[in-house]
Amino acid sequence: MKNLFENISLKNKEKLFKIFRASTVKFTKGLNIIDYMDRTNSIGIIDSGSIDIIQTDYDGNETLIDELITNDIFGSTIYSIVLSDECSIVTKENTIVTFIDYREIENAEFIKSDFYITFVQNLLTIIFEQMSLKNKRIDILTKKTIRNKLLTYFKQLSKEQGSKSITLPFSLSTLARYISVDRSAMIRELKYLKEEGMIDQKTKKIRLYY
Amino acid sequence: MKNLFENISLKNKEKLFKIFRASTVKFTKGLNIIDYMDRTNSIGIIDSGSIDIIQTDYDGNETLIDELITNDIFGSTIYSIVLSDECSIVTKENTIVTFIDYREIENAEFIKSDFYITFVQNLLTIIFEQMSLKNKRIDILTKKTIRNKLLTYFKQLSKEQGSKSITLPFSLSTLARYISVDRSAMIRELKYLKEEGMIDQKTKKIRLYY
DNA sequence: AGTAAAAAGTTGCAATTGCAACAAATGATA
DNA sequence: TATCATTTGTTGCAATTGCAACTTTTTACT
C-alpha cells in the first residue's frame, strides 16, 4: 500500500502541509472524530491506527459503513451524503490522522513543482486502490445469500493470497459486519459449508476444497 | 459531472491522446467489449452511451456489478479482481468509449505542461465522484432488509434532488438490480410502504411522507 | 395504429435469514 | 492466575426474501 508522501522529502512534505493547510492530529481510542473535521472540504489520511465509519438510523440500528486502516483516506468529498449527521467516525485504537484541504489541489502556485506532481500521483494511486477495495466489497454485497457472499469473499482472498489455504485478515465477527449479515447466521452457514466438505475452517484459517 | 477533458483545448486533447495511447471506439448495442480492452493497464471513459458490468457465477446467476453512463470510467485498475474471466462489459446502447493507457500517467515527458496537470486534476475529480457513488451504493447494500434498502436509497435521492418528491433515474427493474434484491419482492415491499402511508409511488414518481 | 418487447405488478410457497438468548472458548490485563 | 471482556458457536422460531409462474400495463418500433 502506497503512502501519500512516498518519494517526497521531509522538506517538501512540510511544504505540502502548508499548501494543503494540513494538520496531523492524534486521537485516543473510542473517539468520534467527526467534530474535528471540516465537513465540507477536508480529507483525512490515517497515518496509524484504525477507524470505523458507523451510521445510526432512526430506529437506532448501527451499520458499519466502512472500516479504515493505515493509509486509508476518508472525507466528505468521498463519502458525501453518507457522511451526514447520523454518521460517526470512531477510532478503534489510538489513531493519528492527517487532514488536508482538498480545495488546494487546484492551487496554481506550486502546481509545477516535482513534489506536488508526485503528491498528486500518489493520491491518485491511493484512490485507485480504494476504488478497487470498494468494488470488491460491492461484488460481495450484491450476492443474495450468505453462502454466496462467503464464497465470493473467500475467492477474493484466495486470489490475493495465491493459495487455497487462506487466513482471514480479521475476526469472524468483523467479517460478518463486512459482508453485512447476521453473525450467528454466518457461522451457521460456515458450519453447513464444512459439513458439505466445501471448506475446512477453524477460526481464521480456512481451506477451500472447490 | 465533470468531463475528463474539461478545460483542455482540442489540440492538447490530441496530445494527451498520443501520450496515453488513447483510442476512441464506437460500439453497437449489446456488445461485450471486454475483448477490446487491454485487461491490465487501460482504463475506459464513456463518451456517450451506457454500459453494464455483469458477473456470471458458476451456477449461471448474473449479478449486476455496475451500471455506467456518460463520463463514467472503468478498467482493471479499478475493478481488479472483479474484472476477471466471469465478467462481461456489455453496451446497453450504441456507446462510444475512449481507452487510455494508465501507465503513462507517470510519463515524465509532459508532466509539467498545463494541459497534463489539468487532465490529472480532472481525472482526480472524476474518481472522487465515482468513489462517492460507490459509497452510496455500499450504504444501501449493507442494509439488511429490502425496506431499509429502499428507504436509504430514497433518502439519498431526496437529498440530491432537494425534495420529498423524487423521480427515479431508472426503471424499477433496474432499481432492483441496483440494490440487489428480487424485483417482485421489491415491488411487494413498495406496496407495503404505500399501504402504511410511508410513500406514494407510481412507476418512477415517488413522494416521501416520513 | 398495430404489434412486439420490456417493464410493472401479483401471489403462493419454500428457503434463507435475522433475532434472541444462550453456553463455551479464547484473549487480555491487573 | 484469577477475572473480565471479547469472540466463537448453538439453536428455535418468526419474519423476510427469492423464486416461479403468471397477468396487466407501458414503451418502442415499423
Image (cartoon, coloured by chain):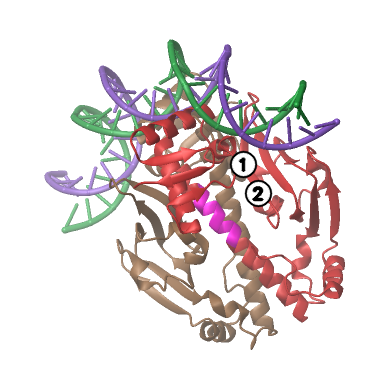
Chain colours: A brown, B red, C green, D purple
Disc 2 or 1, which lies upstream in sequence? Answer: 1
Which residue position is annotated with label 1? B65
Q: Quadrant of residue A108?
A: bottom right
- Considering every residue shown, the one lying at the far bottom of the view is A109
Q: Amino acid at mark 1?
A: Ile
CA separation in Å, label 2 and label 1: 10 Å
Q: Secondary structure at mark 1?
A: strand
Percent x, y of residue B206: 47, 44
Residue at 60% across, 26% down: A210
Magenta range is: B129-137
Q: Quadrant of residue A95?
A: bottom left
Residue A50 in magenta stretch = no
Q: Amino acid at mark 2?
A: Tyr
Please give left or right for residue A6 compared with residue B52 in the image. left
Task: Tell which subunit mark 1 falls on.
Answer: B
Task: From the viewer's side, name the closer residue of D27 and B32.
Answer: D27
- The answer to whether mark 2 and mark 1 are in CB contact below 8 A is yes
Residue at 37% across, 47% down: A63
